[in-house]
Amino acid sequence: MFKYVYSLVFCIVLGISPSFSQHTEEPAAATAAHEEEKFDIGGMIMHHIADEHGWEFTHGVKLPLPIILYTADRGLEVFSSSKLDHGQVYNDYKNEHEHIVRVNADGTVNEAVHPMDFSITKNVATLMLGALILILIFTSVSRGYVKNKGKAPKGIQSFLEPLIVYMRDEVVKPSIGKNYGKYFPYLLTLFFFIFINNLLGLLPGGANLTGNIAITLVLALITFLITNLSANKYYWKHILLPNTPKWMWVIMIPVEVVGVLMKPLSLMIRLFANITAGHIIMLSLFGLIFIFKSWAVAPAISIFALFMSAIELLVAFLQAFIFTLLTSMYIGSAIEDHHAEEHH
């Protein structure tokens, strides 16, 4: 609900503000300024969906984050990201498009020094926040199971238990089979990690964590490792010794190997593309207000923004669900027993 109200207020305020500015400037100067400075909607969108060394909630409200650099000549250096705001140079460092570089006395980049950046960026801070929320929620749920053993669930336990049971009985167990219990903790963590961070990304000033290709890559890589390290001999036999005439192996084996690699790749791209696309659409709608420079478009854009916000809430759940479902299916296919084939 807060997301909806924020979208409506944001659109209306931004729609009205350009109309006031047009009347406060001198006509000739204003016309020249508008001719020379056109609104860069692409730059605005990329700024908001990209990672950064500070956490900007709205224009002018920014939470500084620690910058942690290591260089061979100076060792470890830690300071606030506010020291590098607005192109400032601090301790010979400068933030150039969220890339920290060492500069010379004349302001040019020192190509001989390449700082190793271990900073707490907006995405890293959101990752920590999401992990903390997961720990607090499921610690509370765990205590609830112990305290209310044999009784009806209460509080947050009663809210999450139907979802947990559904994921177990309708997603994980049918996909993996009798050995589902070994993988269920990972799959449940995977689902709630993606879901919670999808929701955090919808909040005003939220980070585009699950729309970051590095995050989705790591999640897909973990799934890839668990799937292939757990795979039995039948899985590998199907890939390396397919049940086809041997003269077809030159075609089938590369196809099967590519299929193994494409599974995590599809997981990575699907989550990244869907979450990023949602943010781009919302920001594009807001950007239309600046492009048209009129408050008259604000009501129409507000309606579309509210509709897209509702869609984004659905997508936040669906993408977490689909990622977990496909991971379960991949693991299930890797550990599936082929008794008939073994007997034959």
Image (cartoon, grey):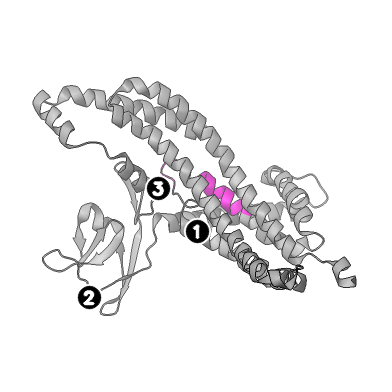
- Mark earlier in primary sequence (1, 3): 3
Residue in the image at 55% along x and 59% along y: 265
Residue occupied by mark 1: 215
Secondary structure found at label 3: helix
Which residue range is magenta in the image?
A: 191-207
Please name the residue that numbered disc 2 is placed on: 112
Relative image position of residue 126 (x, y in whole percent): 46, 54
Q: Is residue 212 left or right of residue 184?
A: left
Magenta stretch holds residue 196: yes
With 339 as the anchor, is 316 left or right in this view?
Answer: left
User: Which residue appears at 46% of the width and 25% of the height?
Assistant: 303
Q: Which labelled disc corresponds to residue 49?
A: 3
- Image location of residue 97, percent across then percent down: 28, 56
Q: Position of residue 290 (x, y in %)?
A: 30, 31
Residue 44, relative to residue 209: is it above or below? above
Q: Is residue 40 above or below residue 223?
A: above
